[in-house]
Amino acid sequence: MISWPSSLVSAIARRRAVILIGSGVSANAETELGQRPPTWGLFLENAYKKLGRRVPHIASSLKRYDYLEACDYLKAAHGAEWQNIVRASFSTPAYRHAPIHEAIFNLDCRIVASLNFDKIYENYAIPASEGTVVVKNYYDGDLREAVTGTDRYVIKPHGSVDTVSKIIFTLSDYAEARSKHANFYEIFNALLHTHTFLCVGVGLADPDLQIIFEDYRFKHGEFPHFMTVPSPVSEPQVDLIRRTRGLNVLKYSPKENHLELTESLQALSKAVSDVRVEIVKTENW
């Protein structure tokens, strides 16, 4: 089980934390037939096969695991059919939420930021909250209220499958978003200053994880945020992640489809609840 730092438990209890979830969380969801959402690599491989022909520059980028570049090529190659391919993989199958989604929701954080453009988490959170959770995409003009408001929010830094044309999925998408939607990244940076982040199911190669956290780390020299990572991960790698991204690694066993992560989050929810009870008793708001 993960041994949760007291500083993180306190930040979540006081709702001064942001839970940042990635594809590793969505991977727990299933359809009625047991189908799970594809990984980024598998989705791109399948999209390449759908072309029905060999395209050397796409094959080369996939072989190099340069998924942003490959995605750019595939989007251009498929043209108008791209939207249907994305929805067929991430929306049409009707994935059901998993216990890990419930565990994250039960932490009752004011802000959950989902790097996933599927809607698995919010499809659970909205009815579970009786419709009080508000969803904001990176391109929305009133994002500031997510920082200053009192409601519960799901922030979508990459957009949603509902509007495929605005999904941030390719090399070009990332470059364009950082220019046209700089206000979103300013707001996200504000959250890094004022909240403690817990990254769950987020890959180390995610471009946002690299750029946003590296920028914060080297500008301010701080290490206040946390990230769950499945073992094995070497101590030199743990140290590198901390030094370059300001993220403290919390390791867990990936056995039984990462069951320990879900159980650890459930235990975290209990620890947070206990602290909140104590806060009420002492009136130490």
Image (cartoon, rainbow, N blue to C red):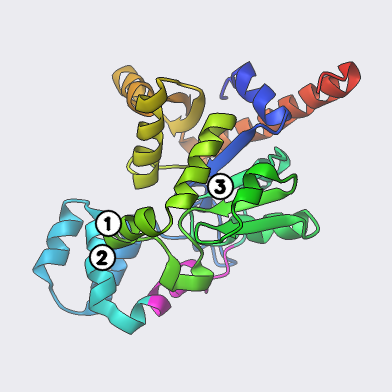
Question: Quick one: 100 or 181, which is closer to the camera?
Answer: 181
Question: What's drawn in magenta, residue-wise?
Answer: 83-95
> Mark 3 and mark 2 in contact (Cβ < 8 Å)?
no
Q: Which residue is mark 2?
A: 72
Q: Which residue is mark 3?
A: 113
Residue 6 is left or right of residue 127, and the answer is left
Residue 227 is left or right of residue 281, and the answer is left
* Circle 1 residues within 10 Å: few <14, some 14–19, many ≥20: many
Instruction: Tell me the kind of residue under disc 1.
Output: Leu
Residue 116 is left or right of residue 83, and the answer is right
Instruction: Tell me the kind of residue under disc 3.
Output: Ala
The Cα–Cα distance between marks 2 and 3, rounded to whole angstroms, is 24 Å
Residue 157 seen in this snapshot: yes
- Eyeballing the image, is 274 above or below 187? above
Instruction: Tell me the kind of residue under disc 2.
Output: Asp
Name the residue located 55 percent from the left edge and 67 percent from the top edge. Answer: 33
Residue 115 seen in this snapshot: no
Q: Quadrant of the C terminus?
A: top right
Name the residue located 45 percent from the left edge and 74 percent from the top edge. Answer: 88
Name the residue located 66 percent from the left edge and 26 percent from the top edge. Answer: 11
* Circle 2 residues within 10 Å: few <14, some 14–19, many ≥20: some
> Mark 2 and mark 1 in contact (Cβ < 8 Å)?
yes
Q: Which residue is mark 1?
A: 68
The Cα–Cα distance between marks 1 and 2, rounded to whole angstroms, is 6 Å
Name the residue located 67 percent from the left edge and 30 percent from the top edge. Answer: 12
- Eyeballing the image, is 85 above or below 22? below
Question: Quick one: 169 or 203, which is closer to the camera?
Answer: 169
Q: Give residue 84's position: percent from left, percent from top.
A: 41, 79
The Cα–Cα distance between marks 1 and 3, rounded to whole angstroms, is 21 Å
Precedes in sequence: disc 1 or disc 3:
1
The residue at the far right in this view is 281
